[in-house]
Image: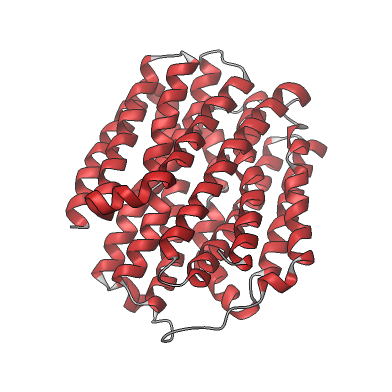
Amino acid sequence: MNREIRFVVAWMTLAYVPIVGSRVVYSLLALDLGADALDVGLIIAGMQFPMLLLSIPVATALERWGSRPLLIAGGVLGVAGFLLPWLWPSLPVLYAGALLFGLWNVLAFQPTQKLVAELSGIDRRARSMSVYAFFAASSLLVGPLIGGVAVDWLGAAAAGLALLPFAAACVLLPVLGAALLRRQAPRGEPAPALAESLRDPAVRRLIVVTSMISASMELFPFFMPLYGHAAGLSASVIGSIVSASALGQLALPLVLTRLVRRIGEAGVLSIGMMLIGVAFAIVPFSTNPWVLSAASFLYGFACAAGNPLSVLLAYARLSEARANQFLGLRNSANAGMRSAGPPVFGALAAAIGLFPVYLLSAALMVAGGALARRMLR
């Protein structure tokens, strides 16, 4: 990989640690403040709401202004998101902070993924996306673990201070490495009209499949703090269980190329969704941290294929201009699923309990895996 790609991956890794760690910190602080499952669901949904509305505008801003100002702005929002609950711990502040982290998420995810795909070239795109997925998973491992331990040691309100240095580094690095974030010249044909892309059946199928995977990626880490809290597990143990999913996501990029070569992109996505269903089905039958960690690992391994494979499928089946636009459409649709999932399933959990909701989620993912294979055949 060239220096530019290494710099983008390094910044992305530093950014994802606090972005993902904030979910554990905010969830446990909300519970300490007396929130129920629906409140926590709304806070987590707030972290996805900006992705729903701003993915396409951020893609346009990236073409117009380049990545550097967007990455700096994201880091500033992260700093504010950790300072606010420490200064004024309350549910309204958590709702506002969730929106800040949601905006940082879109300012981190959209530019870095697009930059890696475009800077890699056709022959090295699969390898670069695997590296991207590997380091994203490493930050998913570190973030919840730091967040959980910080809650135990510093208290939920001050726990964000342990993640604050990562956010500050995300402000400084683009300033110091401006030469490595030069604006990329547009390539290929002009971007098609949005309505034209949405009429493309290939675009619609890819959006539907990746949105189903995206919903599961938000529900599992959303439910685990609730389930662990109800089971009497400590914040450190809950954070460790959530972090186990990142170990699974670290493992998948090591074998992703061989799996795709053997059963194809559609096969990997389909089987992955079914394995996510198995992970959901395991959880409500045990409170043992090791069993829950194993389910979390399986979930992480299975869902890690969603983002890199959707990028590879897009660039393989669509023109480059339409593939670039698809990334914004996909992120917006995924955020819609992630925003709707926690409140809807949180309300179900508050009404009927976590046990049946876990089984319902398992059934939906297994059925979705079968549907995905047919849609992408």
Q: Where is residue 14 in the image (x, y as percent from the top left)?
A: 67, 49
* Quarter of the view holding residue 18: top right
Q: Can residue 313 be seen in this view?
A: yes
Is 209 on the left or on the right of 97, as rendered?
left
Q: Position of residue 149 (x, y in %)?
A: 68, 26
Q: Where is residue 2 in the image (x, y as percent from the top left)?
A: 59, 67
Q: Is residue 353 visible?
A: no
Residue at position x 42%, y 24% in the image:
294
Give the vertical position of 98 relative to 310 (above or below). Answer: above
* Quarter of the view holding residue 23: top right
Give the vertical position of 136 relative to 70 (above or below). Answer: above
User: Total number of numbered labels?
Assistant: 0
Task: Give the camera-side residue of 227 and 170.
Answer: 170
> Which quadrant would the C terminus be assigned to in this image?
bottom left
Is 199 on the left or on the right of 327, as rendered?
left
Q: Residue furthest bottom?
A: 189
Residue at position x 45%, y 21% in the image:
292
Q: Where is residue 96 in the image (x, y as percent from the top left)?
A: 67, 47
Task: Give the camera-side residue of 255 and 198.
Answer: 255
Give the vertical position of 150 relative to 210 (above or below). Answer: above
> Which quadrant would the N terminus be assigned to in this image?
bottom right
Which color mode does the image show? secondary structure
Give the vertical position of 134 relative to 332 (above or below). Answer: above
* Quarter of the view holding residue 310: bottom left
Residue at position x 39%, y 22% in the image:
283
